Amino acid sequence: MTKRLSVALDEELLKEVQALTGARTKKEAIETALRAYVREKRIQGLIQLAGSDAVDWDLGNLKGYRELDRKAP
């Protein structure tokens, strides 16, 4: 599902994201940045749960999770 928006963005920041990600379009750069932000927050949430009884993952499980996340569209 996509959502059409009209937003004012810092042009220099957008150019930097494009350069760092290799994105060819502004849309691709924004989507890449949003995915990276969501991934980081998810990982932080898992780290917060580490050592608790809420999750029973080891390093191998976390690496598998990261691989699945990379393959996500």
Image (cartoon, helix red, strand yellow):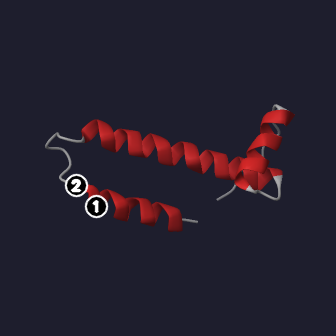
Q: Write down the quadrant of residue 7 in the picture.
A: top right
Q: Label 2 sits on what residue type?
A: Trp
Find the distance from the CA under tag 2 to the CA under tag 1: 6 Å
Q: Residues within 10 Å of mark 1 (few under 14, many from 20)?
A: few
Q: Quadrant of the C terminus?
A: bottom right
Q: Which residue is mark 2?
A: 57
Give the residue at x 66% y 52%: 32
Name the quadrant of the N terminus. Answer: bottom right
Residue 56 relative to residue 67: left or right: left
Residue that label 1 marks: 61
Please indicate whether residue 12 sits to the left or right of residue 50 in the image: right
Q: Residue at x 51, y 63 (%)?
A: 70
At a point 20% along the width and 49% down the height, the residue shown is 55
Q: Position of residue 68 (x, y in %)?
A: 44, 66
Height in image: 22 above or below 44? Answer: below
- Tell me if residue 65 comes above or below residue 4 in the rendering: below
What residue lies at 84% left-to-right and 34% top-to-bottom?
12
Tell whether label 1 touches label 2 (CB within 8 Å).
Answer: yes
Q: Position of residue 20 (x, y in %)?
A: 72, 48
Q: Position of residue 24 (x, y in %)?
A: 82, 59
